[in-house]
Amino acid sequence: MKSLTSLLTKKVEEAFEKCGYSKELASVTVSDRPDLCQFQCNGALGGAKLYHKAPRMIAEDVVKVLSDDKELAKVEIAGAGFINIDISDEMLLGYINEVFDDVNIGVPQAEKEETIVLDYGGPNVAKPLHIGHLRAAVIGEALKRLVRATGRKAIADVHLGDWGLQMGLVMAELEVRHPDWEVFSDRFDAESFEGSIPLTADELNEVYPFASAKSKEDESFKARAKELTVELQNGEPRYTAIWKEIVKISVNDIKKNYDDLNVDFDYWYGESNADKYVPELLEALEKKDLMYESEGAMVVDVAKEDDKITVPPVIVKKSDGSSIYATTDLATIVQREKDFKPDGIWYVVDQRQSLHFTQVFRCAKKAEITDAGLEHLGFGTMNGADGKPYKTRDGGVMRLSLLFDTVYDAAMERVKESKFSAEEDKADVARKIAVATIKFGDLINHRAKDYIFDLDKFMAADGKTGSFLLYTVARVNSILKKVDEEKITAAASVFTDSERDLLLKIALSGEAYALAFKERAPNIVCENAYQLAQSFSKFYHDNHILTEEDEQKKNAWLRACVVLRKVIEKHLDILGIESVELM
Ligand code: ARG
C-alpha cells in the first residue's frame, strides 16, 4: 500500500495542477513542527521564481482548492508560504484499517522487481567468531529482512573466509600434532578416504591462534603453511580432503553462534567457491587490457584524478600465483552475476575495509563484469567503556559466544524473578531478551558509528532498548488477554489526543521503512519502533482502557492496541528480534 505522504502528495499535486501550477512542486512531507501540524508542503516557495508570484499567493490558490477536501481536517498557510496540513480522523482511521488488513502491514512495496545479494557475516573458517563479527551479522540480517519486507528479493551469502593463509597455518599445525592421522600418512588414498578426521571444534578453535603465533617466530613453519595454502589452492587431494573436514567442523560451530542470534543465510559459499571464476575474471581484465606487471604481481590501476586519498592499484595475482582477497571478491562478483543476476550487491563489512572495496568496485566496473550497484555498507566498532574495542576482562579478544552468554545470564537473572513466565519457558524468554538486548543496542546506532557496549544501559526496562519494546508488546498482550479479542471491531470513535498521536505514529511507520531502505539504515526502524512504544506508553497512561465504560470508546482503544502490536512486531521482525508473550 501507499505511504500516507504519497497519498497526500497526490492530493496536493492535483490541487497545484488545478490552479495551473506544476505538480512537480507538490511534494508533501511529515511536518518538521509536529506541534503545528501533521504534514507540510513547501511547494509554493519553489513556485515563486517559476511564476513570478509571491509564494503566499500561490499557497492561497492551492489551499482554496484543498479546503474542499473532506479528508483534510486543516489546510493553512504559514510563514512565507508553507502549506500546513492535518488529516481528518476519518482518513487516519481508514488508513489504519488498511494497515491492519495489509499483508505487508503497511510497508511500502517496491515498484519493480529487484534482487539484492547481501554479503555479510564474513566469518573465517577455523577462527571462532568474536565480537568483531557481531555487527556484520546483526546489521546484515536486519538489512536482508528490510529488503524482503519491501517486496524485493534478498539473497544472503555468508562469504566464508575459507581460502587464505589461515587454512595453511591450521593444516601445518595439525600435521605436526597428528602425523598419525590417515590424511597425513602414507596410507592416505584420495579415492578411498571416507572423509573424517578426529578433530573437535574446541581443538580447532585453539589451533589457529596457536599456529598464527608460532608462524611469527618459526620461519620454516611459516614457509610450510604458505606451501600448504598453495597446495590447497592447486587442488591437491590430500589437503583438499583435510580442508573439507576443517570447513565442515568449523561451519557447524559458526552456525550455532548465528542460530543463537536468529541470523541465517541462504548460501554458505566461501572464498573457495570463487576460485573457479578467477580465469574468467582474468580474461575480462585481459580483454580490456587493464592488467600490467608490477614487482612480479599483476595489478590494475583504479585511481581517479579527483581522489582525495591515494587509491593504489589492486593486485589481482601475486608473484607466487596465489589469489588474494581482492581477486576473490572480484571473482565472487563474476559468480554472483552468473548465478543471481543481481541489481545490487551490498557488502556489510567493517568500515576499515573501505579502501579494499573502493578498489574492488572500481576494478569490477572497469572490467564490466557486472551492472549491479555495488555498495559497501560499512560499520563502526563496538567499544568497551574505555572507548577501545570491546575486550575480555584480561584484555583478550571477546568471543561472540561469551558475549552472548554474558547477556543471556543477565537476562535470566531478570526472568527468574518474573512472575509471568512459566518455568519451562524461562530459558526461551531469556534467550529472546538477550537477542533483543544485543541487537537493539547495536542497531539503534547508525551503522557507520562506533558505539559503547553497556550492558546495564542496553538492558534497561525503558529508554531505547530491546527490553522496552518487548515489554510494550507484552503489555499489550496482557491487556488483550483480559478481553475477547475476536469481538474487537474496526468501529470509529472520537479520538482522544494520545489516541490520535498513537494512530498517526502507526500510520507514519510506512515513511520510516521507506527511508530506512533508501538509506540502508536499520537504525531508522529502531527509532520508529521506539517512538511507537513511547506513544503507546502515553496512550496507555492517558486512557483507562479496561475500565472504560463507554463500550464504543473501549472498543476503539482495544483496536488501537491490536494494530500497534501488529506494527511493532513488524518492526521487530525486520530487526531480527522475536517478541515474548509476557514479561
Ligand atoms: N572474512 C573477511 C574478514 O574477516 C570479511 C569478508 C567480508 N566480505 C567480503 N566480501 N570481503 O575480514
Image: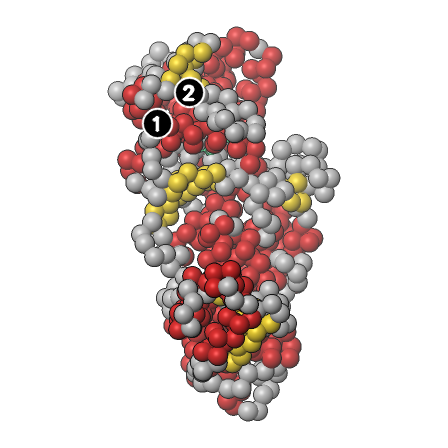
* For residue 327, above or below residue 521: above
Q: Position of residue 142 (x, y in %)?
A: 48, 50
- The three-letter code of the residue at mark 1 reads Ala
Which one is earlier in the sequence, the residue at label 2 or at label 1?
2
Q: Which residue is mark 2?
A: 300
Residue under the image location 56 percent in, 33 percent down: 352
Count of numbered labels shown in the rendering? 2
Residue 449 image-quadrant placement: top right
* Residue 314 position in % (x across, y down): 45, 22
- As drawn, is 465 to the left or to the right of 22? right
- Residue 572 can be seen in this image: no
Is there a contact, CB below 8 Å, between mark 2 and mark 1? yes
Q: Which mark is residue 60?
A: none
Q: Which residue is mark 1?
A: 367
The residue located at (62%, 57%) in the rendering is 465
Please determine whether, in this image, residue 352 is positioned above or below residue 115: above
Given residues 329 and 572, the one toward you in this image is 329
Q: Check disc 1: other Cα within 10 Å, few if <14, some if 14-19, many if 20+.
A: many
Label 2 packing within 10 angstroms: few (<14), some (14-19), many (20+): many
Q: Secondary structure at mark 1?
A: helix
